[in-house]
Amino acid sequence: MARILTSLHGKKAGLTDLNRLMVPKGFLAGEHGSQFGYSSPDRVVFFDDFIGDVTLDQYNFLEGTDSATSSELILAGGIGGVLQITTGDAGTGLAADMAQVTQALQWQASNGGLVFQTRIKLSAITTCYAFVGFTDLATALEAPIESAASANTLTSNATDAVGFMFDTRMTDDKWWLTGVATDVDATAQNSTYAPVADTYEVLRVELTAAGKADFYRNGAHVGTTMTGALTAAADLTPTINISKTSVAASMTAEIDYLYLEMLR
């Protein structure tokens, strides 16, 4: 057992009798908009830098019907660890060509402090689709939210999901901030930013216990706080989806890391 003997601010932080620094609520590193917390008695934290040559058992890799060309692997020679996912190349749409990574349904906004963050780059930004965030289906291929292929309107396939969506079938080819709560779409927002091919960017979603969402790109807050982003009590998995929407050519996403956090 340890207690704070010398404190900076009351009993919020200080030194124990063994001269160890003690912070009862845990540690946080990084600037606002791109921060990692560390596991503590009151927080669940998952971080994967994709070090090694095989993925962890926690991941599901889901693929479309053109499974002969889609793949998931730790990139050989990926300095610092990189997960690469590759789409199919049938050229007939998401059902054939999408590649998706999920985990188990072990995350809920209702706990409080739910965070998703990844550093990712797309090999292509034409005739393609990507969704990065949380969804409610872990073991079957599904584009959580996609373009309705009419102006800037959306189709939500998930019952509950929230995240960044890029779909070149939209009139505006930008990262869209999207959410759906028990089949009720949140008001989507155009972030005004688009991915750049083969260029890493950091995407982060923060959720309150009431199901409100804030979105950050490269550490900067984008859009405004989204109400009704998803149902707070919905069971969620992190998800990364990519696909070509047409054209018989594959594309890749390279994922430098995945970070998740939630209050217990």
Image: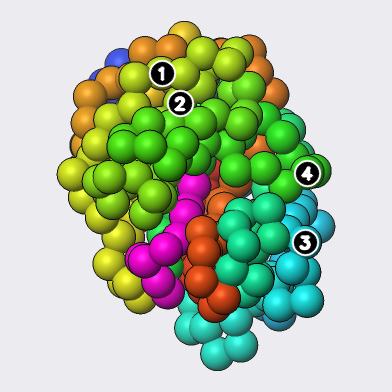
What residue is pinned by disc 1?
186
- Residue at coordinates 21% horizontally, 50% vertically from top-left? 193
Marks 4 and 2, the one that precedes in the sequence: 4
Secondary structure found at label 1: loop
State how far apart marks 4 and 3 are (Cα): 12 Å
What segment carries the magenta color?
A: 123-131
- Visible in this render: residue 198? yes
Q: Quadrant of residue 163?
A: top left
* Mark 1 residue crowding within 10 angstroms, few (<14) / some (14–19) / many (20+): some
- Residue 190 is left or right of residue 80, and the answer is left
Viewport quadrant of the C terminus? top right
Q: Which mark is in front, 3 or 1?
A: 3
Q: Position of residue 168 (x, y in %)?
A: 37, 54
On screen, residue 112 above or below 205? above
State how far apart marks 2 and 3 are (Cα): 27 Å
Residue 80 painted magenta: no
On screen, residue 2 above or below 31? above
State how far apart marks 1 and 4 are (Cα): 23 Å
State how far apart marks 1 and 2 are (Cα): 5 Å
Residue 127 painted magenta: yes
Marks 4 and 3, the one that precedes in the sequence: 3
Q: Position of residue 224 (x, y in %)?
A: 23, 24
Q: Which mark is in front, 4 or 3?
A: 3
* Mark 2 residue crowding within 10 angstroms, few (<14) / some (14–19) / many (20+): many
What residue is pinned by disc 2?
179
